[in-house]
Image (cartoon, rainbow, N blue to C red):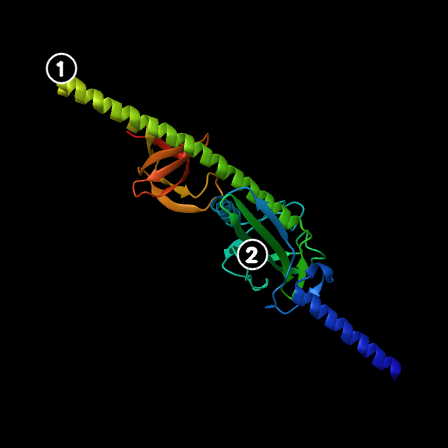
């Protein structure tokens, strides 16, 4: 009788310890196969990185990876190195509610079968990835990523071994680098456009001077028009038929901002080898591939 009471007391202490660890969010201290209810959130350590980039650029990088439909750093079968089919959601019950600063984003993949890099993963279930973007100041931004896999039938939670968070963060870093590089190119293009405008204004003044001095307004106007047409030919393009997608960033997997019809006129703001930063006649800005545009007739 005494042995049974001692055993029951020890079991009670163990249960209390597990509850304390859960409440504190020390998921890494618990066994990897933790059975929880379907709607029970999971606290995970995840991966945190601070970038030397503005919150705006970091959010753009996160949004691009968020919408790429890929769960990076894992796979289902060895012959399928890229796990596609993920979708963006507003929230996920698989994570504890975030009450801290910043913006939170979620991406999930349903019906994944025993994905790699989730500890002791088995059966079919859902992969969920959470991204938290926290501004530090105008030039530094912190990103936290968490990933879990939950079996559909047994509701067993499998924490990532860190590879998913690592590869997702790597993708975000690459997207931020591309965005910053595009911003530098855009600044150079703006300077070039300003120079072109100065040239244009110079031509206008020359026209006025020549008209006053020589009385040949018609000839000067024709010359000015040629200059304007030349500048327009340089800075404007039209969309090739049947049309194209205006992208949020300069790569094919970026989110589409708008469908542009063939013949739509665009002003070039940024020039890169394969993509052009453009502005529509309505003032919307985005990216489009070079080969999808042609010269203004």
Above or below residue 125? Residue 280 is: above
Which numbered mark, 2 or 1, is in the foreground of this view? 1
Q: Which mark is residue 260?
A: none
Instruction: Measure the C-alpha gap from mark 2 to mark 1.
Output: 73 Å
Above or below residue 201? Residue 71 is: below
Q: Position of residue 199 (x, y in %)?
A: 29, 24
- Nearer the observer, 120 or 242: 120
Image quarter (top left, top right, bottom left or bottom right) of the C terminus: top left
Looking at the image, which residue is at 56% across and 56% down?
108
Label 2: element kind = strand
Image quarter (top left, top right, bottom left or bottom right) of the N terminus: bottom right
Residue reaching furthest front? Answer: 137
Residue reaching furthest left? Answer: 215
Q: Position of residue 137 (x, y in %)?
A: 51, 47
Tag 1 residue: 214
Q: Image quadrant of residue 210? A: top left
Q: Image quadrant of residue 150? A: bottom right
């Amino acid at each position: 009788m005494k042995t049974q009471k001692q055993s029951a007391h020890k079991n009670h202490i163990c249960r209390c310890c597990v509850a304390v660890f859960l409440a504190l969010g020390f998921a890494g201290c618990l066994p990897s196969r933790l059975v929880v209810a379907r709607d029970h959130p999971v606290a995970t350590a995840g991966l945190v990185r601070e970038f030397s980039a503005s919150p705006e650029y970091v959010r753009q990088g996160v949004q691009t990876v968020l919408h790429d439909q890929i769960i990076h750093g894992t796979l289902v079968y060895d012959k399928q190195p890229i796990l596609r089919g993920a979708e963006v959601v507003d929230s996920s019950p698989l994570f504890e509610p975030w009450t801290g600063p910043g913006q939170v984003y979620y991406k999930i993949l349903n019906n994944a079968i025993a994905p790699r890099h989730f500890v002791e993963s088995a059966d079919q279930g859902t992969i969920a990835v959470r991204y938290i973007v926290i501004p530090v100041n105008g030039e530094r931004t912190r990103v936290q990523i968490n990933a879990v896999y939950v079996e559909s039938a047994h509701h067993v939670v499998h924490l990532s071994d860190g590879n998913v968070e690592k590869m997702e963060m790597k993708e975000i870093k690459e997207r931020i680098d591309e965005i910053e590089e595009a911003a530098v190119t855009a600044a150079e293009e703006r300077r070039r456009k300003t120079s072109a405008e100065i040239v244009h204004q110079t031509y206008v003044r020359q026209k006025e001077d020549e008209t006053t001095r020589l009385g040949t307004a018609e000839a000067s106007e024709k010359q000015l028009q040629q200059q304007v047409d030349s500048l327009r030919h340089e800075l404007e393009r039209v969309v090739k038929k049947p049309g194209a997608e205006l992208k949020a960033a300069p790569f094919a997997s970026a989110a589409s901002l708008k469908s542009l019809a063939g013949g739509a006129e665009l002003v070039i703001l940024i020039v890169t080898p394969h993509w052009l930063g453009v502005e529509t006649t309505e003032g919307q800005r985005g990216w489009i591939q070079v080969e999808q545009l042609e010269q203004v007739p």
